[in-house]
Amino acid sequence: MLNTVYLNSIRNEPMDGVRWLMQGYIGLLEDGTKYCINMNNFFESHVAVVSKTGQGKSYLVGVLIEELAKSRIPVLVIDTHGEYRSLILPNDDTRIELFDKFGVGPRSFASQVKIFSLNGKDDIKFSLSESKLSVEDIQNLYPGKLKDANKEHLHRIIFRLRNKKYRIKDIMKKVCRIKTSAKYSILGLLREVKSLNLFSPNYTKPTDLIKRGCVSIIDLKMLNKRMQITIVSAVLKMLFHARKSGKIPPFVLVVEEAHIYSPQQKNEMSSEILKDIAAEGRKFGLCLIVVTQRPSKINKDVLSQPSVQIYLKVTNPRDVQSIYDSIENVTSDLKERLKKLSKGECLISGVEEDKTIKIKIRVRHTKHGGKSQSFLQDGV
């Protein structure tokens, strides 16, 4: 039988009865003891998960989501590559010894998981509010296609419609009244926006995405980068506002490939809201889990905010240096340890003061949807 160590996720303090029930089993310590994190205190911290590609980053995040689901903490996953819909499927690995080693078994979270996508055929149909369509949205979706003069026309039209629940067709009617030939290029662009089926009067609301006990996944896999950024920007603004006004419960936000949405070298449409959540989300009960395989490419204001860091193997010199420059408690010794980790191993920093803990990530209850399907084979 495995021994268990229960640790507060932010600081060492006695666990009361409620907190005892809210422990998240992450993996095994080097001596084979179970390692658990206090899920209650997720809301006192942000978390960064950093790894080079193929080292089990999304597998580990899947483990974290499973534990959050067990504690019935609301979760929203920005699923850039469609890796997390497999949470509805039990792990079908046939190696019984793997489950025995970690003391877990196959399980599905289908009753708690809701998958949203633009497709809506097999998933829940996702869309943004048509009456929130902005000039910035159009610029982001079709960079370089909106000339300054046409931009001014659209700004004026949307401003006049601001107090109404307008639709794209209402904007188009106003554009038709423009007396210059500029209206034709604007109308063409609006037709393209409409054809995306991204904006709707029956849009996805904050209360659709955030519910107690639910894991909501927005699958962005089949979308181009401009659409992904537009959606993430709108969703994060909507949810942060809803959380601050108390319309939705506290929740955990998982942002996969976060360097896409808040890059270091470029100011994307989603950059500012992600920085705002990283800086202020904790005050409002919004925990951010930032996931990236390129720490050198993510905005430093986002990467520096999490007080808990989970590192898998990182070898790229720029990425290692970026971690060292952005995160306070990274030592030169830790830099070397990052390079020597094996697949399925991680270092956790910020859980216990002045300690970095090495663990072997436990096998998942659910099927892994990422590319690195077999990383747990090492050392089993």
Image (cartoon, rainbow, N blue to C red):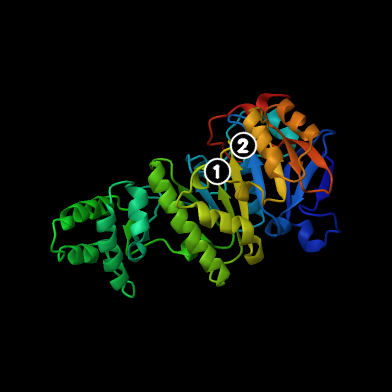
Q: Residue at x 30, y 53 (%)?
A: 197
Horizontal and vertical percent position of residue 42: 69, 56
Front in this rendered view, residue 138 or 291: 138
Q: Quadrant of residue 98?
A: top right
What residue is pinned by disc 1?
264
Horizontal and vertical percent position of residue 333: 80, 32
- For the view shown, which residue lies furthest in the front direction? 149
Q: In the image, is 96 to the left or to the right of 219?
A: right
Q: Quadrant of residue 326?
A: top right
Residue 128, above or below 345: below
Residue 357, above or below 268: above
Q: Which mark is residue 57?
A: 2
Q: In the image, is 107 to the left or to the right of 165?
A: right
Is residue 314 visible to the viewer in this orientation of the structure?
A: yes
Q: Amino acid at mark 1?
A: Gln
Q: Residue at x 45, y 52 (%)?
A: 269
Instruction: Determine the CA span between mark 2 and mark 1.
Output: 21 Å
Q: Quadrant of residue 214?
A: bottom right
Is residue 380 visible to the viewer in this orientation of the structure?
A: no
Front in this rendered view, residue 182 or 168: 182
Q: Residue at x 63, y 58 (%)?
A: 279
Is the residue marked by circle 2 packed among few (<14), some (14-19), or many (20+) residues within 10 Å?
Answer: many
> Which secondary structure lies at badge 1?
loop
Q: In the image, is 83 to the left or to the right of 168?
A: right
Horizontal and vertical percent position of residue 162: 33, 72
Q: Which is nearer the N-term, disc 2 or disc 1?
A: 2
Q: Amino acid at mark 2?
A: Lys
Is the residue marked by circle 1 packed among few (<14), some (14-19), or many (20+) residues within 10 Å?
Answer: some
